Amino acid sequence: MAAIPQFTHPIELLVNGANHRLTVGGSATLLQVLRNDLGLNGPKYGCGFGQCGACTVHVDGVAARACVIPAAKVQGRDITTLEGLGDRLRPHLVQSAFIQAQAAQCGYCLNGMIMTTVALLAQNPHPSQQAVRDALSGNLCRCGTHVEILAAVEHAVAMMANTTSDMAQR
Ligand code: FES
């Protein structure tokens, strides 16, 4: 039986501030490239249809669903994953807020919750409860940890306000 031809092509992606030259399949999604080629497992595979938010990343600072974005389409764009926000030693403020609020049960949705929250707070540092609910409404949590997640976002907003007022007083 004849082998099925594999169509691959070179692409260049800017991820978490680093440039990567890769050879990927013609139909590779950004999520596949991030997880399989770059070993960035912060973004998760949930539905694969852009419906659950588990795969959320930032493209030019805007929350986007990596499972439905062709990798070749985001060449030249600034891509940030959960790993690009912070790490265990220097977590992002929103990551710290989620840890302090213990806003996780299985944790599978947290990538999307955190990436969406970071994008929201960059646009609106003082969101109303309704604005937070609206922003996170497309991020599914099957454990039902929504109350803790909303508390974590509220905590992040308060931490941000404190940081801003501390800096203003210096
Ligand atoms: Fe991308 Fe569900 S895996 S939105």
Image (cartoon, helix red, strand yellow):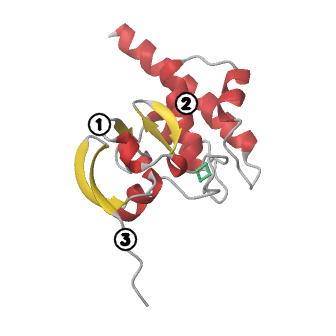
Which image quadrant is residue 5 in? bottom left
Q: Secondary structure at mark 2?
A: helix
Query: Residues under labels 2 and 3: Cα distance?
Result: 46 Å
Q: Which residue is mark 2?
A: 156
Residue 74 at what x, y percent from top left?
38, 41
Q: Residues within 10 Å of mark 3 (few under 14, many from 20)?
A: few
Quadrant in the picture for the C terminus: top left
145 or 81: nearer the viewer: 81
**Discs 1/2, front:** 1
The answer to which of marks 2 and 3 sits earlier in the sequence is 3
Marks 3,1: beta carbons within 8 A: no
Determine which of the numbered discs, if any, sits on residue 169 in the image. Answer: none
The answer to which of marks 1 and 2 sits earlier in the sequence is 1
Mark yes or no: residue 86 visible: no
In the rendered view, does 40 fall on the left or right side of 56? left
Mark yes or no: residue 61 visible: yes
Q: Which residue is mark 1?
A: 76
The amino acid marked with disc number 3 is Gln
- Looking at the picture, does residue 132 appear above or below residue 6? above
**Discs 2/3, front:** 3
The amino acid marked with disc number 1 is Gly
Query: Residues under labels 3 and 1: Cα distance?
Result: 25 Å
Query: Residues under labels 1 and 2: Cα distance?
Result: 31 Å
